[in-house]
Image (spheres, coloured by chain):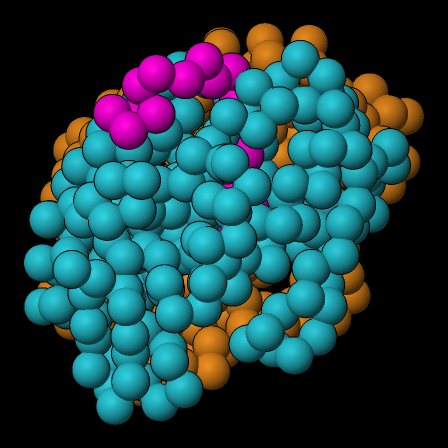
Chain colours: A orange, B cyan
Amino acid sequence: MTEQTKQFAPLVKRILTDGKCLEGGILKVDNFINHQIDPELLKQMSIELVRRFAAKDINKILTIEASGIAPAIMMGFLLDVPVVFAKKKKPSTMSDMLVTSVFSFTKQRSYDVCVAKEFLHKGDKVLFIDDFLANGNAAKGIIDLINQAEAELVGMGFLIEKAFQHGGDYLRGQNIQVESLAIIDSLDNCTITIKE
Amino acid sequence: MTEQTKQFAPLVKRILTDGKCLEGGILKVDNFINHQIDPELLKQMSIELVRRFAAKDINKILTIEASGIAPAIMMGFLLDVPVVFAKKKKPSTMSDMLVTSVFSFTKQRSYDVCVAKEFLHKGDKVLFIDDFLANGNAAKGIIDLINQAEAELVGMGFLIEKAFQHGGDYLRGQNIQVESLAIIDSLDNCTITIKE
């Protein structure tokens, strides 16, 4: 279970320097992950994730638009495998597809996540990549899509995990290899506490 | 004006092989650009865009979420400059920002595009990157944001331009260096006609 507590120092350092903690357990990392992206840090983080999943056979990266796209693209580039991004709305031009419903805790409503059947199917060995792991609802939706497709989930990689929202506990309890580059224990009192 | 008609052969070939033309002038490139991304093609396209803007001094890549993120990230990686993605909704955690309104021809309604002031400002030399150039409304919105920020637009790079929707004519008429890797003359009768 050492994976749970391995912290990737360059990201932790950056979170403590540039991250902002807002009321309600919100961690704002707009200036290097969510709104402006630092390409050097993105490369370092992606290489670290490649290293952590080195033992796995991967033929596809899956993410959810929009903020998961950046690390997913860099992983796809490094591993030379296709990157599929699940969409949060059914595109008008997409017909034959897999759909799941995800409840957003932040927005207090459900939304559909979908992927065309032709891009996720039996035999695929899928690594899911996203920026944040919080309560794990999006990840659960992805597991549902992968099960529908009869594909294989080989692991889930996140840049930042909010341990106090327990999505990581659930996913690791399902025997999924979950790797998070920075794990945050608490954002109470607008203070960022990194897991020991 | 040779830039207007330079076609990037690997992309043109892929469009003719895997692109699908739907009713209403829609070009579907889901299996290599919009939903599933081919990392090798993405790298080749990004390098070609780097080559075309080689004479320009660039310190920031700007794009609009979601489908512009992939090429923008790869460009940022190659040029080692930050990538900023303008957002289509005002995030609840974002305060001090620039906003513009863009009319979507496809959806027949306007939407806001915004960027935090701290990520776009005077002195920035901005290269805008997006997947599609059609009527140019999104690009006009970006120009407005760049003007509001008193930043400098050094050029606009697109993967695919629909010449028959004339956004490229408008932008080139403003003396902007516009580079499109594949230019499509017509999608009439569900046939993809590449510009000569």
Q: Residue at x 43, y 34 (%)?
A: B177
Measured as percent of width and height from the top left, residue B84 is found at 57, 32
Q: What is the tally of numbered marks visible in this picture?
A: 0
Who is closer to the viewer here, A38 or A105?
Answer: A38
Check the image and report above or below for A4 versus A103: above
Q: Residue at x 41, y 25 (%)?
A: B76
Check the image and report above or below for A43 versus A87: above
Who is closer to the viewer here, B121 or B30?
Answer: B121
Q: Residue at x 82, y 20 (%)?
A: A191
Measured as percent of width and height from the top left, residue B5 is found at 23, 49
| Region of the chain picked out in magenta, as a range | B50-67
Who is closer to the viewer here, B132 or B90?
Answer: B132
Left or right, A18 with respect to A117, comes to right
Is residue B63 in sight in this rendering?
Answer: yes
Q: Residue at x 59, y 54 (%)?
A: B138
Quadrant where the N terminus of chain A sits is top left
Measured as percent of width and height from the top left, residue A54 is found at 18, 30
Check the image and report above or below for A25 versus B136: above
**Magenta stretch contains residue B82:** no
**Magenta stretch contains residue B60:** yes
Is residue B69 in sight in this rendering?
Answer: no
Measured as percent of width and height from the top left, residue A170 is found at 52, 52
